[in-house]
Structure formats: structure tokens, C-alpha cells
Amino acid sequence: MEILNMNHIHILLLIISIFSLVTFNFNGATAANPHPQTKPARPSTLNPAIKKICDSTDYSAVCASSVVPYLINGKTDRASVLIMQVNAGIHATERGIQITKRAMNQPSTSYVAQRVNLCLQEYDSALDDWKGALGFVKARREFEVANVLTTIVSHTSVCEDSFAEDPTFNMSTFPFVKINDLIRTMAGSALSIRINAFPEK
């Protein structure tokens, strides 16, 4: 599994942030932003509470950079940060779907076309799972949250494994590879954040 370097992370997160703003403008409110005209906050320094939570994940830089744009209401408890990470995952997956659709329109062999189409199906399923996770977080159903987040990781693996069947094929030449890694990383971070996110009342 390829580990994202910081340059790739920053470029991808910039793309996703821009894409999410466009989504806000055209689709109105989202779960993280109930006011269509309100842009995600971009504080100049990282909130200490968010830093502490993201530091508990395996990819703290990705976590911090991706959740900050969704800090709208000032809440920084683990459940709220988890919602931010899930929303970031939703927009990353939507971006992955767009990239994969463009790849489908490029000339390719039947082998490649079939596997790109499979990746698109997996991204569609991952998007449904991200949205399901959002509902489960709000309902404080930790078991279901963990299940759907784990499934998202599986979707990205299915996409990559389909290309791995041919050891001569260089999957790194396809533009959705990095976003695939980012989606998986965000799901992994969300899995870490959900631990202790729902304390007993």
C-alpha cells in the first residue's frame, strides 16, 4: 500500500476543499453546514482539541488538514470531529467519482475499462457508506459506524486489487490512485476518532 507524501496530501486536500465549496454553492446545505451561504471556517492555527484528536490517528496531518474546513459551529468533541472527518470523506469520494468517470472516457483496453468501471462502482458504494456513517454518528451507534467505515476501506482495496491481477499493469499511471489512498486514509482516521466518541451518559 502506498503511503501518501505531504505534497500529494496538500494538493489533494486543496482540490477537495475547492470541490466542497462548489458543492455547497450548487447543492445548498450539507450535514456539516446547514447554511448554504456560509463557507467553511479556515482558522490560521489548529485548534488544540482537534490537534489532540487527530494526533491519536495514524495520519494526523491528513486528519487535521481535512477536518478543519468543516469546523462550523465551534464544537471540538470527538463526535463532532468525527462528523467533520466523515464529511471530508464524502467530498473526497465525490471527487474520486468525478476523476474515475473522466478516466472512463479516455481510450483504453477492455481490461482497463472493466476495472475502471469496477472502481467507479466501489466509489459509489463507498459514498453511500460515508453517508450512512454520518447518520450512525448522529444516532450514536458506534458499532454501525465502525462497520461502515471498515467497509469503505474494503471498497478502496477492491478497486486496487482488481488491477493487481495483472502484475505488468502500472496502476500508478491512473489519476484516481492518489484519491483512492486518501479515501482509505480518511476512513482509517475516522475509525480511530470514533473510539471514545460516544461516552456513556
Image: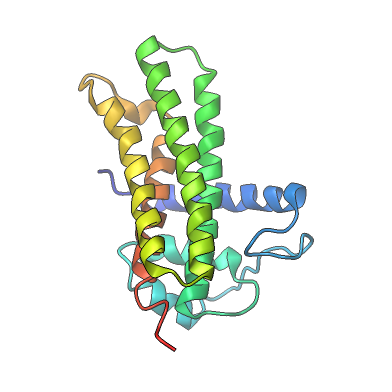
Q: Is residue 188 visible?
A: yes
Residue at left 52%, top 74%?
Answer: 80
Q: Nearer the viewer, residue 62 or 8?
A: 62
Asked whether, in this view, residue 16 is left or right of residue 121, the answer is right
Position above or below: 16 against 82: above
> In the picture, which quadrant includes the C terminus?
bottom left
Asked whether, in this view, residue 38 is left or right of residue 122, the answer is right
Which quadrant holds residue 148? Answer: bottom left
Relative image position of residue 114 (x, y in whole percent): 40, 18
Which quadrant holds residue 70? Answer: bottom right
Relative image position of residue 13 (x, y in whole percent): 51, 52
> In the picture, which quadrant includes the N terminus?
top left
Q: Nearer the viewer, residue 173 or 143?
A: 143
Which quadrant holds residue 68? Answer: bottom right
> How is the rendered protein coloured?
rainbow
Asked whether, in this view, residue 76 is left or right of residue 52, the answer is right
Residue at left 54%, top 27%?
Answer: 101
Position above or below: 137 against 161: below
Q: How many marks?
A: 0
Residue at left 36%, top 78%?
Answer: 196
Residue at left 39%, top 10%?
Answer: 109
Q: Is residue 11 visible?
A: no
Q: Nearer the viewer, residue 142 or 172?
A: 142
Considering every residue shown, the one lying at the far bottom of the view is 201
Considering every residue shown, the one lying at the far right of the view is 37
Relative image position of residue 55 (x, y in whole percent): 35, 73
Relative image position of residue 44 (x, y in whole percent): 59, 73
